[in-house]
Amino acid sequence: MKHKLRIWVDGTMLAFQLLTTVPIRKQIEWDDERAKASVSAYPLVGLILGTLMALQWFIFTEYTSISPFVLVGWLLTFSILFSGGLHLDGWADFHDAVFSRRSREQKLEIMKDPRVGTFGVLALLFVVGWRFIFMLEIVKVATPSTVLAVIVIYTLVRLMLGWQVLQSKFARAEGMAAALQPAKTKVMVIIYLIWTIGLALLLLVVSPSLISLLLAAVFFLVIWKKWVNDQLAGITGDTIGAGAEGGETFLWGILWFLLL
């Protein structure tokens, strides 16, 4: 029992080391069991980030006179600092590769290039710019359930990270994504089903209107996986992160639409 608990704790710390800038400096051994435990903790990372974002949203709107523009600017900054810009880098690399219109092999090589090209810069401007616009509009018409929606969005984004790993084949035999191969088990699928169904039931009880966010996340994930597979015949670490960034902006857009 202690051994299993140790693996779960190590896996959770690995998830935070990979997906956040939380200063966990412990050197953790990477093996199959800890890889699985790491992926199982992705939604927990999202839940914690979402809670931190929602708390700030609530405190600033209820107890300060800060302008919506500054509030959204700070929240965006905080979320990017929390993740270290890791997923934004993947978003830029993926779009540089896709819009190069090269062969699959050349696209994979472009994604290894640490430099960001024109298409990557434009993609970053679009994904962050539209997210800022959606969040700004939401702040102006926010309801009490909006705070819960913030938590839901960030939890769903990290759920989508894990589902990409569990349901997709890998474009390369090496790399960060391929290192997560041991997580592709029936047990992990069950864990993610529990996360997903549990979240759905919670929303149905607490705020049924927000179930639309879960349905939107499923829709985005299906479309995203198909596009990535058409382009690269599999996922990479960059496409997993890119899916998180695109999915987050998409969900903010859905929330804005629900509040119209």
Image (cartoon, grey):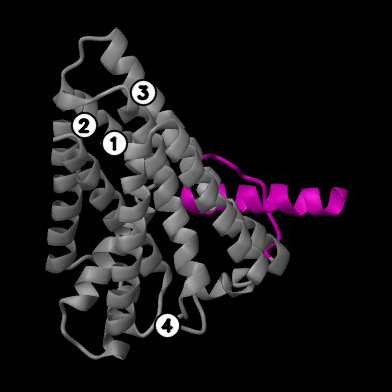
Q: Which residue is mark 4?
A: 171
Callouts 1 and 4 close, C-beta under 8 Å: no
The residue segment tinted magenta is 1-30
Element assignment for label 3 = helix
Task: Please check the rendered image and state whether residue 22 is part of the magenta-colored stretch, yes or no.
Answer: yes
Residue at the image point whose x is 43% and y is 30% from the top:
52
**Residue shown at the point (69%, 55%) measured from the top left:** 28
Report, in whole angstroms, how far the alpha carbon at label 2 lies from the one at label 1: 6 Å
Query: Quarter-wise, where is residue 233 in the image?
Result: bottom left
Q: Residues within 10 Å of mark 2 (few under 14, many from 20)?
A: some
Amino acid marked by disc 1: Thr
Q: Which of the two labelled residues, at mark 3 and mark 4, occupies the earlier sequence position?
A: 3
Left or right placement of residue 65 versus residue 151 in this view:
left
Q: Where residue 112 appears, x then y in whole percent?
A: 35, 75
Q: Which residue is mark 2?
A: 73
Instruction: Say which amino acid is labelled 2.
Output: Gly
Q: Secondary structure at mark 4?
A: loop
Instruction: Residue under label 1, please give it.
Output: 77
Label 1 packing within 10 angstroms: few (<14), some (14-19), many (20+) = few
Check disc 1 and report its element: helix, strand or loop. helix
